[in-house]
């Protein structure tokens, strides 16, 4: 362990006393806590300013996506709303393209329009955490009950005709 000579210790003590006397004569220095607090406030203000100044890099794409959705559904969603920004920017940051968004909109409109699930055709549902599965979903068009009944009727009619022919023979 290194030991300081006694003269050095006395000098340091003397310097501390002088410094404290100078502080009382002049203005008092801020404490360490006050300095940290002041620095945090400045950093927070700088961050907020930089957020406001930060360009919205996905604005053109988001506008295009929301306009397509509104056109397809006849709705009036806004491209500038915080919720729409959140979901669309998140997917764009993951590397999805505008065409991917349009594909999801088309698939889900085809599947959900005219059904009970039509109410879920909105940005937070379409562009949320299931976006990738919606994008990769195979398109399976549901047959309407009228089509099913018509095909069953034609099958039954065909069956009855074949039975009658067999009876005639």
Image: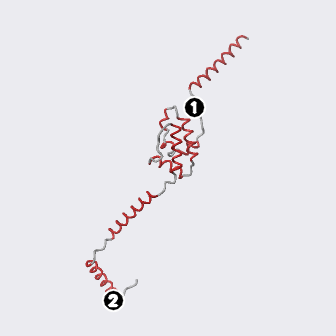
**Which quadrant of the figure has residue 169?**
top right
Residue at (47, 40) in percent of width and height: 76
Comparing 30 with 79, the one in front is 79
Q: Secondary structure at mark 1?
A: loop
Q: x, y (%) of residue 27?
A: 28, 75
Image position of 79 (left or right of 155): left
User: Is disc 1 surrounded by few (<14), some (14 to 19) or many (20+) residues within 10 Å?
Assistant: few
| 147 in relation to 8, above or below | above
**Which residue is label 1 attached to?**
142
Image position of 104 (left or right of 42): right
Foreground tag (2 vs 1): 1
Comparing 41 with 32, the one in front is 41
Q: x, y (%) of residue 47?
A: 42, 61
Tell me the distance, in whole angstroms, between the alpha carbons under discs 2 and 1.
94 Å
Q: Which mark is residue 7?
A: 2
Give the number of callouts: 2
Dividing the image into 4 quarters, which one contains the N terminus? bottom left
Residue at (50, 36) in percent of width and height: 74
């Amino acid at each position: 362990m290194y030991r300081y000579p006694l003269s050095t210790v006395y000098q340091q003590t003397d310097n501390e006393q002088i410094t404290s006397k100078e502080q009382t004569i002049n203005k008092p220095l801020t404490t360490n806590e006050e300095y940290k607090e002041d620095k945090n406030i400045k950093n927070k203000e700088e961050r907020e300013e930089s957020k406001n100044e930060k360009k919205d890099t996905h604005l053109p794409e988001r506008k295009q996506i929301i306009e397509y959705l509104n056109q397809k559904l006849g709705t009036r969603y806004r491209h500038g709303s915080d919720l729409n920004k959140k979901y669309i920017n998140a997917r764009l940051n993951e590397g999805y393209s505008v065409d991917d968004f349009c594909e999801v909109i088309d698939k889900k409109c085809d599947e959900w329009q005219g059904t009970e699930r039509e109410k879920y055709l909105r940005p937070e549902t379409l562009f949320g955490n299931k976006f990738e599965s919606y994008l990769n979903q195979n398109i399976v068009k549901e047959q309407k009950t009228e089509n099913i009944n018509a095909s069953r009727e034609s099958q039954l009619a065909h069956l009855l005709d074949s039975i009658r022919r067999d009876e005639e023979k």
